[in-house]
Amino acid sequence: MGMGVDFRYRMAKRASEEIKNGMLVNLGIGIPSLVPNHLPENMHVIFHSENGIIGMGPSPVKGEEDSNLCNAGGFPVTIQSGGSYCDSSIAFGMIRKGKVDLTILGSLQVSSKGDLANWIVPGKKVPGMGGAVELAQKAKRVVVVMNHCDKSGISKIVKECSYPLTSSKCVNLIITEMAVFKIHVEELWLTELFKGIELSDVIERTNCEFRVNEYYRSIPY
């Protein structure tokens, strides 16, 4: 992989291509929160947060944060003109009713069948599951954005998840810094490679078998 590549930029930019005009979108913390930076200015998208913000805006300029305005992860945000607030039970009701068109989440592991494990590492303290279960089950489309391997170099795309599942067979698309995979009928398909990545690199670093789309796209950034 080329030196100096900003992998967070790369993944967030590709994930932004999944958003269409008029969607209600929920973003996870971390890399997914960078996705709005890559949307066209004329695109109309409503960003939803589980703690009760409908119409969330970009991160505030440093020094201009509102201590009363944060996303579900506790990070400062802004609100778009025309945005609104509601009780978290209403925000969760929107998810459970299937009103969220797309959720973009991080993950610890994703299986080749689309199982999602993103809420806990056994033995480590976490603040709670948050909205991950509802989003994974009820969003119309689930996109995972994550590093291809963990800090130990172990593939996060696996045949079977070893971490506790958030939800089974729910992921539609996986975007890593190396490639993009679609999950179709419980099968993993590589559909895109990022610039500077060889197919052999992906095969070597992926801990499960996958099919390769004959006409896979090369992403130029």
Image (tube, rainbow, N blue to C red):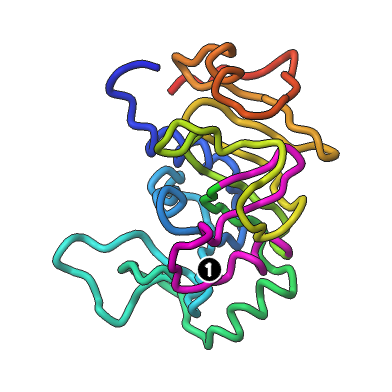
- Residue at x 46%, y 51% (from the top left corner): 32
Mark 1 crowdedness (10 Å alpha carbons): few <14, some 14-19, many ≥20: many
Does the segment drawn in magenta span residue 117? yes
Residue that protrudes farthest toward the left in the picture = 63
- Residue at x 49%, y 58% (from the top left corner): 28
Query: Looking at the rendering, in which quadrant would you find the N terminus?
Result: top left
- Residue at x 45%, y 75% (from the top left corner): 82
Q: Nearer the viewer, residue 221 or 177?
A: 177
Does the segment drawn in magenta span residue 19? no
Give residue 96's position: percent from left, percent from top: 71, 74
The image quarter in which residue 94 lies? bottom right
Residue identifier under label 1 = 48
Q: Nearer the viewer, residue 53 or 188?
A: 188
Task: Reply above or below: 117 against 195.
Answer: below
- Residue at x 53%, y 48% (from the top left corner): 108
Query: Looking at the rendering, in which quadrant would you find the C terminus?
Result: top left
Question: On the picture, is 160 further left or further right than 127?
Answer: right
Q: Could you tell me what secondary structure mostly forms the magenta stretch? A: loop
Magenta segment: 109-137
The image quarter in which residue 208 lies? top right
Q: Nearer the viewer, residue 97 or 149?
A: 149
Give residue 7's position: percent from left, percent from top: 39, 32
Task: Reply above or below: 40 against 211.
Answer: below
Task: Reply above or below: 30 against 11.
Answer: below
The image quarter in which residue 125 lies? bottom left
The amino acid marked with disc number 1 is His
Give residue 70's position: percent from left, percent from top: 35, 73
Give residue 219's position: percent from left, percent from top: 52, 22
Question: On the picture, is 37 further left or further right than 99?
Answer: left
Residue that protrudes farthest toward the right in the picture = 185
Count of numbered tags: 1
* Secondary structure of residue under mark 1: strand
